[in-house]
Amino acid sequence: MDLFVEHGYEETTVAQIAERAGLNRATFFRHFADKREVLFAGEDVLAGLFADAIRAAPPQATLIACLRAALAAVGDTMTPQRRATARRRILIVAADSELHERGQLKYARITSSIADALRERGLDDLTARLAADLGLLAFRVAFERWMKAGEEEPFPPFAVKALNDLQTRAAEFSDPVTDGKRTHSGPHMSGRSAAST
């Protein structure tokens, strides 16, 4: 990560990474398929935590309870150290279109893992896919808010609030909308606010 920041992602070689880490190239490739994986190594961990929490939820757990359990499971991994690393990774990924695409693929794989776990609980395919998208969106919204919060703020409350916010917005989908505004006294639903959710 230091090398990517210092020299840029494209200019940094595997040999440089291995040397900085005090390893040889063979050891590097035992851990990572390529240098992109240095940035996305936590993908499988997150996917596993989400899916395992859903599988471990009580049989009578509601769908939303399963999603809450999944978000709670990743909370312990969202440490101040991870926040600092994430800030650097965001800058590195934003500067490279290939990495940005790889990041989107990461999210797709995590969503698929969540959906698979929900199907195992007996949900139909469409419901599982919708719930998985909702769960990952809650995680992403929570993560964005957490990154902007104070250094000592824990992640779990942000996850709870993000999921609650999305539930509230989804419940309002049936409200009439005219010219981008709700016809009742609730909050306006402009194109900007809809896109931000």
Image (cartoon, rainbow, N blue to C red):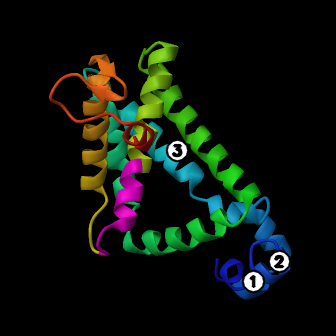
**Callout 2 touching callout 3 (CB < 8 Å):** no
Q: Mark 1 to mark 3: distance in Å?
A: 31 Å
Residue type beneath disc 1: His
Q: Nearer the viewer, residue 24 or 137?
A: 137
Magenta residues? 141-151
Q: Secondary structure at mark 3?
A: helix
Q: In the rendered image of this protein, does residue 52 appear above or below residue 92?
A: above
The residue that label 2 is drawn on is: 11
Locate residue 112, reporting x and y percent. Answer: 57, 32
Secondary structure mostly seen in the magenta stretch: helix
Question: How many residues crowd around disc 2 within 10 Å: few (fewer than 14), some, or many (20 or more)?
Answer: few
The residue that label 1 is drawn on is: 7
Locate residue 19, reporting x and y percent. Answer: 78, 86
| Image-based side of 50 in relation to 60, left or right | right
The residue that label 3 is drawn on is: 47
Residue mark closest to the camera, 1 vs 3: 1
**Is 40 inside the magenta-drawn segment?**
no
Residue mark closest to the camera, 2 vs 3: 2
- Upstream in sequence: badge 1 or badge 3: 1
